[in-house]
Amino acid sequence: MNFGAFCSLFGYIVLHMILYSANVYFWRRFKINYSFIIGFKEGTELGYREVFLLSSGLAVLSLAAVLSNLDMEMDQRTKSFSAFTELVPLGLVIVNFPDNFLADQLTSQVQAFRSLGFYICYYFWGDFKTRSNKCIERNIGTINRTL
């Protein structure tokens, strides 16, 4: 598993959410009607504390996934379940994908989409079973280069 791609994907998402919570804080402090500008229904938008709480929770969940994956890799009893240990990051991507996809600032997450292209290729073609990344050799590897 390429932990660099996993960490960078969730690092960018968490960083984006933290910056969004800072934006909400300053918008409220300077009395900018951001709910109207973004198109939220009045009273349904999240506050900066809620967004920061969600980003902190996602960071903790990501760290737990990384640590559990590393623990399963080091433990001799679970070392034979290498395909299962490679599915732990996929579970976290699936949990987070709807929130990420529906975010209103998708254009600022180009690097996250590059990492998502890697995950699609890595899991769709079954490279996680052999722990190889042959996306570059396939035509689908152009997803990572075009984004």
Image (tube, rainbow, N blue to C red):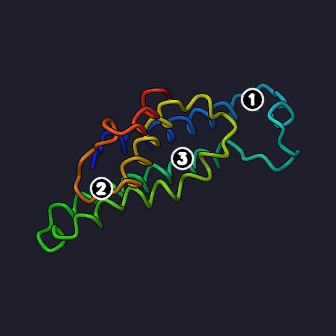
Instruction: Determine the CA span between mark 3 and mark 2.
Output: 28 Å
Q: Earlier in the sequence, mark 1 or mark 3?
A: 1
For the residue pair 9 and 23, the one nearer the viewer reads as 9
* Neighbour tally class for label 2: few under 14, some 14-19, many 20 plus, Cα within 10 Å: many
* Left or right: 60 as drawn, with respect to 137: right
Q: Tell which tag, 1 or 2, sits nearer the viewer.
A: 2
Farthest residue toward the front? 139
Mark 2 secondary-structure assignment:
helix
Picture quarter containing residue 129? Answer: bottom left
Question: How many marks are shown on the rendered structure?
Answer: 3
Q: Residue 89, relative to residue 75: is it above or below?
A: above
Q: Provide the secondary structure element on which disc 3 rests.
A: helix
Q: Which residue is mark 3?
A: 55
Q: Which mark is residue 48?
A: none
In the picture shown, does residue 100 fall above or below 75? above
Residue at the image position 56 percent from the left and 51 percent from the top: 97
Q: In the rendering, at what x and y percent does residue 58 appear?
A: 49, 52
Eye-nearest disc, 3 or 2 = 2
Q: Residue at left 50%, top 41%?
A: 14
The amino acid type of the residue labelled 2 equals Phe
Sequence-wise, which precedes: disc 3 or disc 2? Answer: 3
Instruction: Give the Cα distance between marks 1 and 3.
Output: 19 Å
**Left or right of 37 in this view: 59:** left
Q: Which residue is mark 2?
A: 128
Of the residues under marks 1 and 2, which one precedes in the sequence? 1
Q: Position of residue 9 (x, y in %)?
A: 43, 41
**Which amino acid does the dot numbered 1 rest on?**
Trp
Kind of residue indicated by mark 3: Ser
Q: Is residue 106 above or below residue 61?
A: above
Disc 1 marks which residue? 27
Disc 1 from disc 2: Cα separation: 44 Å
Foreground residue among 55 and 69? 69
